[in-house]
Amino acid sequence: MSITQQYLLDTYRARRLGEPAPPAPGANDWQVVRELRDHWQFRAVVAGRPARGRIRQTLGRWLRPRSTG
């Protein structure tokens, strides 16, 4: 059963039972991404690492031209 079919079935059941309709699939995706990012930042702070700019800093170290002198 696809996500759309499950959503339609849940909506039908909710309507028959007089309950509020469930949220549409994908309605809260960005909220989940934001909460996951906040969780990663929190864990970084607890571990004593910088919470922001870690990826850019690492890429900068890897991509910086090395001095040959």
Image (tube, helix red, strand yellow):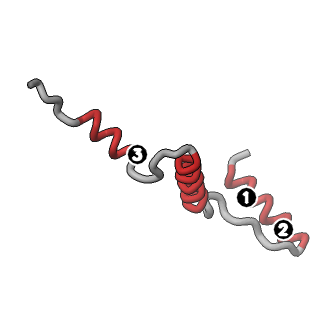
Residue at x 21% of width, y 36% of height: 64
Residue 54 numbered tag: 3
Q: Give the Cα distance between marks 1 and 2.
A: 10 Å
Query: Could you say whether the residue bearing mark 2 is in a helix, strand or loop?
Result: helix
Q: Earlier in the sequence, mark 1 or mark 2?
A: 1
Residue 7 numbered tag: 1
Residue found at the very far left of the displayed protein: 69
Q: Nearer the viewer, mark 3 or mark 1?
A: 3
Residue at x 17% of width, y 33% of height: 65
Would you say 5 lies left or right of 63 here? Answer: right
Q: Which residue corresponds to mark 2?
A: 14
Residue at x 59% of width, y 52% of height: 39
Give the class, few, some or many, for how many residues have Cα within 10 Å of label 1's Cα (few <14, many ≥20): some
Residue found at the very far top of the displayed protein: 68
Give the class, few, some or many, for how many residues have Cα within 10 Å of label 2's Cα (few <14, many ≥20): some
Q: Check whether the beta carbons of the residues at disc 3 and disc 1 lie within 8 A of each other.
A: no
Amino acid beneath label 3: Arg
Q: Give the Cα distance between marks 3 and 2.
A: 45 Å
The front one of 47 and 43 is 47
